[in-house]
Every structure is written in C-alpha cells, then in structure tokens.
Amino acid sequence: METLLDIAEIMQILPHRYPFLLVDRIIEFEPRQRIVGIKNVTINEPFFQGHFPETPVMPGVLILEAMAQTAGVLMYHEVTDHRTKLMYFTGLDKVRWRQPVFPGDTLRLELTVLRIRSRYIKLRGEAFVDGQLVAEAEITSLLVDRESARKATARQRTAPPAATEAS
C-alpha cells in the first residue's frame, strides 16, 4: 500500500488539527473521481475516554467525519488557493453503520465522486476494516470563503440576544 500523501502533507492541505484530524494518509487519488484514505484507530484517541471506557468503540459520526476529511483532500486539490477556503458539510444521505470500529483497527476510507462543481461536491463514501464494510454514506459539502465564514462567526458572537416576551 503506497502512501501518496503522509500526515505532514495532509496537514498542509486540511485545516484540521489534533485531536480532530481523522485521516493519516492518502493511498489512492484520481482527481475529480476518487480518493482513498487511511485512519489508524488507536486506544489513545481522546473519544475513547468516554465512548465507552469499558468497551471502546469509535463513534459513528467520527467515521463520517473521517470520510469527509478524506473528501476534503480531494476537493481542496481543485482549488488554486485552498488556504482561503473552508469545506462545510451540507448533507448526509443513506447513512448506514454496519460494524463497530475498535482500537487497533485500520479504517480504509473510499470516496467516489458522484457530482462535482466549483464549490460543491457529492460523494459516495465507504469505510472498511479488514475488507469488511463498516459504514457508508452519501456526503455533500460546500466550499466557502474562509474570511466570509470568519466574519459570519464574529457577527454571531457579537449579535445581541434575541428579545423574549415577558411572562
């Protein structure tokens, strides 16, 4: 299994950082068509402290996030200056979790493009452990301008609280 992008190279592309960077390497990549990433699941993951300490299981939503981050590598490749953009989830469809994922497992994250536009992408994602399908979903995401997102966040923080009717 050849590594096309290692963790250091992924960190130059994705804005995510520990403990929320959930893809360790990229092993296959066909621009605008397909990408395959690897996530090594270790007992040191912070989420295992509470999910579930006696029987640690990777939260299913984080498997979906790992798929989305792998898709982000593909999408950011399409952008001239990816450092000025953020990729937001806009939808999840046909989500199914088939098997639990445990510490020591290696997730193989396979994403195939269903539709791609300049700012929009829809993909079919599948996660495998030892060749067994553990999760699947259709994922849609939107590429937004990072500065616009930052300004919108700042406006939300400074907005006065909504008026409430006195009882």
Image (tube, rainbow, N blue to C red):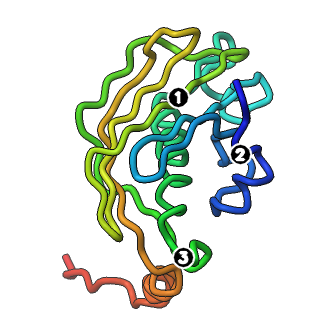
Q: Amino acid at mark 3?
A: Thr
- Mark 3 / mark 1, whichever is N-terminal: 1
Residue visible at 54% across and 48% down in the picture: 69
Residue 58 as seen in the image, left or right of residue 116:
right
Q: Nearer the viewer, mark 2 or mark 1?
A: 2
Residue 143 as seen in the image, left or right of residue 18:
left
Q: Which residue is mark 1?
A: 59
Q: Which residue is mark 3?
A: 80
Residue visible at 47% across and 25% down in the picture: 127
Q: What is the C-alpha distance between the residues marked 2 and 1? A: 25 Å
Q: Quadrant of residue 166?
A: bottom left
| Secondary structure of the residue carrying numbered label 2 | loop
In the rendered image, residue 83, in percent from the top left (x then y), is placed at 62, 75
Residue visible at 75% across and 50% down in the picture: 18
Q: Amino acid at mark 2?
A: Leu
Q: Is residue 165 above or below residue 32?
A: below
Residue 102 as seen in the image, left or right of residue 44:
left
Q: Quadrant of the C terminus?
A: bottom left
In the rendered image, residue 106, in percent from the top left (x then y), is placed at 66, 20
- Mark 2 / mark 1, whichever is N-terminal: 2
In the picture, the disc for residue 5 is 2
Q: Nearer the viewer, mark 3 or mark 1?
A: 3
- Mark 3 / mark 2, whichever is N-terminal: 2
For the residues labelled 3 and 1, say whether their Cβ atoms are less than 8 Å apart: no
